[in-house]
Every structure is written in C-alpha cells, then in structure tokens.
Image (cartoon, rainbow, N blue to C red):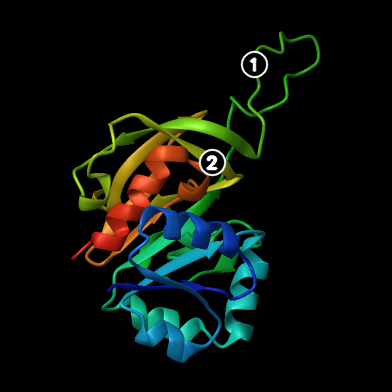
C-alpha cells in the first residue's frame, strides 16, 4: 500500500488536501506529517503551500522539515501544490525571497498592461484583478503520467498573485493564461508541481491526485 506524507510545516490547506487524496486514492495511507522521520519513511510526498513566500520559507526552516523535504525530493515522488510549487524554484519576487532552488527559475508577480489601472481619461476596458482567483483552462504542453485520463484544456481552480517562470522551458508540462501565458505545471524526474489547487478542482483535480498515488517515476 502506498503511503503519502502531506508536509505540514504550518503554511498550507493540509486537511483539504488530505480529504481529496483519501477520496481519490482510498487504498493509500494518507497522513499529515509534522516530523522529519514521517516524511522520510513515506513512499511519496505532497508539499502544499499557502500565504506569503517569506513566511512560507521561514516557517519551513523553523519547522525542522526543510532537510527532510530536500532529501525526499531527491528520490521519492513529490507533488508540489500552489506555493509549494513556487517554493521549488530559485527565488521569488515576493519579498525577494530565496527558495529551495530545486528548479532553476524565478517566481514573478502578475504585471503588465492587462493588470495596470488606466490613465486619467483613458477607456478602462477590462482590467484583470490580482490575485487571480477562479477556474482557468490548463493546456497540457507535453505528455506526463499525471495527465492520464485528464482532458487537454481541462479547468482547474487557481488562487495566486505570483507564478513560476522556469529558466528551462522543458520543465513546463502545463500552461495557462491570465493576462500573460504562464507555466502552471512543471515536472522533472520524480517531481511534479502545480500552481492550481487539485483539491478544489472537482473531477480533474481528483484524477490528478489519483494519478500521483499510482505514479512510478
């Protein structure tokens, strides 16, 4: 039986993730884990995140779980979710924060003409709000085991103001658009990570969790 450790370092919607995983993979042993030994003994890892990046990185360090996450990421199937995806990259613009540097790249804030307030006298048009909240289509950029039985351009649920910008385009396996086109799913070897929330994404999200529970990278 697969054992899935959800890393609880104090900054994530851990109970919602656990409920969704248990529904998607009822045969798996799903646990919310607060001790390094629990993470290292599990067969696969889910790494969620929620909140401001400086707080997430500080709390991860203070929890004593950082080394266990890094060690697990070297060999175990690992799924990053939301800020847990962003934390895998080198640095975030949010607080100019160094991250885990498992993937080369930056985490950027939504910016540009689509988000800018119009100048006085200009037609306001449609200005996109930040944070981006709601359902968006996800384009599968390349095949991956975690896309099994999920339609291309399926809708997933997002809540975020920042997005990952990988240095290596080959890391991107899913892409979405919100004023700009951005990577919303990245993968390499035993790591898969998404900006959206599978636990809030109905059937497609549960299918992705099911695929992760069965994944053999």
Q: Residue furthest right?
A: 120
Q: Residues within 10 Å of mark 2 (few under 14, many from 20)?
A: many
Total marks shown come to 2
Nearer to the camera, 166 or 206:
206
The quarter of the picture where the C terminus appears is bottom left
Nearer to the camera, 73 or 21? 21
Give the answer, above or below, for where 180 lies relative to 3: above
Where residue 157 sits in the image (x, y, percent)?
A: 51, 39
Query: Which residue has dot 2 on it?
Result: 158
The quadrant in which residue 184 appears is top left
Q: Secondary structure at mark 1?
A: loop
185 left or right of 112? Answer: left
Q: Relative to residue 53, is residue 101 drawn left or right?
A: left
The foreground one among 22 and 81 is 22
- What is the x, y in percent for residue 197? 50, 48
How far apart are the alpha carbons under marks 1 and 2?
A: 20 Å
Q: Residue at x 67, y 28 (%)?
A: 116
Compared with residue 200, is residue 118 higher up or lower down, i.e. above or below? Answer: above
Quadrant in the rendering for residue 102: bottom left
- Asked if residue 44 can be seen in this view, the reply is yes
Q: Position of residue 187 (x, y in %)?
A: 29, 56
Compared with 215, 34 (above or below) is: below
Discs 1/2, front = 2
Residue at 38% across, 57% down = 193
Task: Check disc 1 and report the residue beneath it.
Answer: 126
Query: Percent from the top left, x then y, of residue 95?
Result: 66, 62
Q: Earlier in the sequence, mark 1 or mark 2?
A: 1
């Amino acid at each position: 039986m697969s054992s899935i450790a959800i890393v609880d370092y104090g900054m994530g919607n851990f109970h919602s993730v656990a409920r969704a995983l248990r529904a998607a993979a009822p045969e798996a042993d799903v646990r919310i884990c607060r001790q390094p030994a629990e993470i290292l003994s599990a067969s696969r890892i889910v790494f969620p995140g929620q909140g401001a990046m400086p707080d997430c990185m500080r709390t991860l360090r203070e929890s004593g779980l950082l080394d266990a996450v890094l060690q697990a990421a070297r060999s175990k199937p690992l799924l990053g979710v939301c800020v847990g995806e962003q934390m895998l990259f080198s640095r975030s613009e949010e607080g100019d924060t160094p991250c885990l540097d498992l993937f080369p790249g930056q985490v950027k804030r939504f910016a540009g003409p689509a988000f800018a307030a119009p100048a006085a006298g200009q037609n306001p048009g449609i200005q996109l709000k930040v944070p981006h909240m709601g359902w968006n289509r996800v384009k599968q950029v390349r095949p991956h085991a975690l896309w099994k039985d999920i339609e291309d351009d399926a809708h997933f649920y997002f809540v975020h103001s920042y997005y990952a910008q990988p240095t290596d385009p080959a890391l991107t396996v899913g892409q979405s658009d919100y004023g700009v086109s951005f990577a919303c799913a990245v993968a390499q070897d035993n790591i898969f990570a998404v900006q959206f929330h599978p636990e809030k994404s109905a059937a497609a999200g549960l299918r992705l969790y099911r695929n992760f529970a069965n994944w053999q990278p």
